[in-house]
Image (cartoon, rainbow, N blue to C red):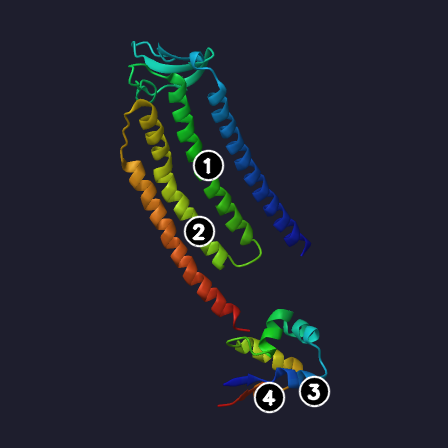
Amino acid sequence: MIIIRLDRVMADRKISLNELAEKVGMTNVNLSNLKTGKMKGIRFETLDAICKVLDCQPGDLMEYKS
Amino acid sequence: MEEKVKKRRSRIRIMQALMFGIIMFLFFQVEDFVEVIFTKGDVYEIRREMPLGVTNGQEINVLYINGENYGDADVNEYMLLDENGETDLKYCALMHQAKGLSYSILLGAMLIVAIVIANSAIDASPFTHKNANRIRLIGVLQFALAIVPGLVRFLMCFFKFQYSNAELDVNGFYMFAIAFAIMTLAQVFDYGVKLQEDIDSIA
């Protein structure tokens, strides 16, 4: 199971949901759904934008747990 | 951005105007029907006349109500006889109006549902469960359009004249085919909804 750790990285970078959504070019609703693991997938384009804004690696944003 | 909002508002206004036009049309159809109910039977008259511009002696039946020409009268619609061998022109006119009214109501309902679908798709994806059900509803109304007006006329004729006839012609089959096509489209829309949900669940 893939667990999204976006909330941790957001807290480390001290960035709010609204601010991140605006910088990434997503709606608050979609970003919130992504953060809470309700999304089934993520586009590379979106992943690229989030990593750029948060200055992190894709691996920092998700974790696999069996 | 402002232009987009203006465009959206103008599209909504056009659709609201169309809906209003359909409702007013239906209102006038109902008004005509009610008018026939309250008109006395002796003001109805069928006259044999030569159409304007015709010189070969061809004559047609024309319906007159209160001395006013109301158009051609189909002999199969207006020359029905009851058990006493008498015709009732007012009832024949009522049957004709009832058939027309049922056509109008069903067609109007179909158009209104289509406008609601178009309206919902202005700023959002049209692939929703509600729209799929609305398309299914249009299909059902189309089936009804193939059956109900004829049935109304059939039953009214049978009730008064103890005789009635009905025929399933090419138009009837055509309407059934259209209804079937619309129901198939509703199934395609159901799949579209699934695809939309899949896309929406990807960030």
Alpha carbon distance from label 4 to label 3: 11 Å
Q: Which residue lies under the disc numbered 1?
A: B105
Residue situated furthest right in the rendering: A14
Q: Nearer the viewer, mark 1 or mark 4?
A: 1
> Residue drawn at (71%, 80%), measured in percent from left and top?
A15
Q: Residues within 10 Å of mark 2 (few under 14, many from 20)?
A: many
Q: Earlier in the sequence, mark 1 or mark 2?
A: 1
Q: Which residue lies under the disc numbered 3?
A: A12
Q: Earlier in the sequence, mark 4 or mark 3?
A: 3
> Residue drawn at (66%, 80%), measured in percent from left and top?
A53
CB of mark 2 within 8 Å of CB of mark 4?
no
CB of mark 1 within 8 Å of CB of mark 4?
no
Residue situated furthest bottom in the rendering: A66
Q: Residues within 10 Å of mark 3 (few under 14, many from 20)?
A: few
Amino acid tagged 3: Asp
Alpha carbon distance from label 1 to label 2: 17 Å
> Residue drawn at (46%, 15%), measured in percent from left and top?
B40
Callout 1: SS: helix
Question: Which dot marks residue A60?
Answer: 4
Alpha carbon distance from label 1 to label 4: 61 Å
Q: Which residue lies under the disc numbered 2?
A: B135
Amino acid tagged 4: Asp
Q: Chain of mark 2?
A: B
Q: Nearer the viewer, mark 1 or mark 2?
A: 1
Callout 2: SS: helix
Amino acid tagged 1: Ile
Q: Chain of mark 4?
A: A
Alpha carbon distance from label 3 to label 1: 63 Å
Q: Position of residue B2 (x, y in %)?
A: 68, 54
